Image (tube, helix red, strand yellow):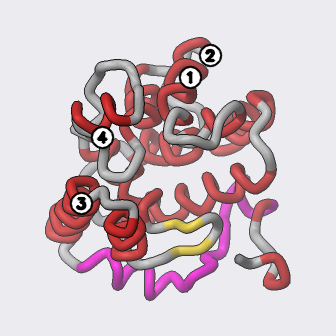
Amino acid sequence: MSIYPNEAECIRLLEEAGCKRRVIIHCCTVKTLAEEIAKGIDCDMDLVIAGAMLHDIGRAVDHSINHAVIGYGIAKDLGLPDEICQIIKRHTGAGLDEEDAEEFGLPKDDYIPRTIEQKIVAHADNMVSDNKLVAHFHSVEKLKIKGSFRGADRIENLHNELSEIYGSDLDIVVNDMGPYPEMTGDCAEFTVPPECRL
C-alpha cells in the first residue's frame, strides 16, 4: 500500500482546494505523460503519479508563478508527504534558481528539481500546454521570447538528461502518444472531447 494519495484521492484534493475543471484536466494530462516517462526510468511510480496530479494545486488560488509556492503551502497544510510538497514547489519550468526567485519575489529557497521524480513531473509539465502534449521546445521557445534564457537552457538540459536516462528522445514519446492522449483510471472522466481541444 502506497503512502501517497491515489489518483481518485488527488482529484478529490484538487476539487476540495477549489481547482477548476480545466486545471484538473491539465493535471491529468501531465500525469498521463509523467507516468509514461516513468515507465522507462527507475523511480517511485506512486510518487510520480501523486506529484503530477497535485503539482498545480496552487492554481486553486493563483495562476501566476507564485502558484508553486502557494501549492507547496496547501500541500503542507493538508499533511501530504514532504516528497509531494517538494515536487509541487520545484515543478515550474526546470526549476527556478536564486536569481529567478529574487526576480519573481519568491521566498528564498531551492526551487530546482533534484530527485528523479521531481524532474519527471517538472518536465512532463513542460511538455503539456493546457491539455495538449507538445514537444519540449514549445516551453523553451516561450521562455526565450520572455528573455528567460537561463530557464530555457535549464529545460533543454533537463530534456536531454531525462531522454538519456529513458533511452530515447522524450519528444518521440510525446509524438507517439499524440496531442491528446487517452486518459486512464480516475482521470478517464476528464478526457477532453475533440470539440473542446485547445
Secondary structure of residue under mark 3: helix
Decide if residue 1 is in sight here.
no
Earlier in the chain: of badge 4 and badge 2, it is: 2
Earlier in the chain: of badge 3 and badge 2, it is: 2
**Dot 3 and dot 4 residues touching (CB under 8 Å):** no
**Residue of label 1:** 75
Q: Is residue 145 above or below residue 78?
A: below
C-alpha separation, residue under disc 3 versus residue under disc 4 = 12 Å
Q: Nearer the viewer, mark 1 or mark 3?
A: 3
Decide if residue 69 is in sight here.
yes
Residue type of the residue flagged with mark 4: Leu
**Dot 2 and dot 1 residues touching (CB under 8 Å):** yes
| Residue 26 percent across, percent down from the top left | 64, 58
Is 22 left, or right, of 82 in this rendering?
Answer: right
C-alpha separation, residue under disc 3 versus residue under disc 2 = 35 Å
C-alpha separation, residue under disc 4 versus residue under disc 1 = 19 Å
Q: Which mark is residue 149?
A: 3
| Quadrant in the rendering for residue 118 | top left
Q: Which mark is residue 96?
A: 4
Q: Is residue 130 magenta?
A: no
**Dot 4 and dot 1 residues touching (CB under 8 Å):** no
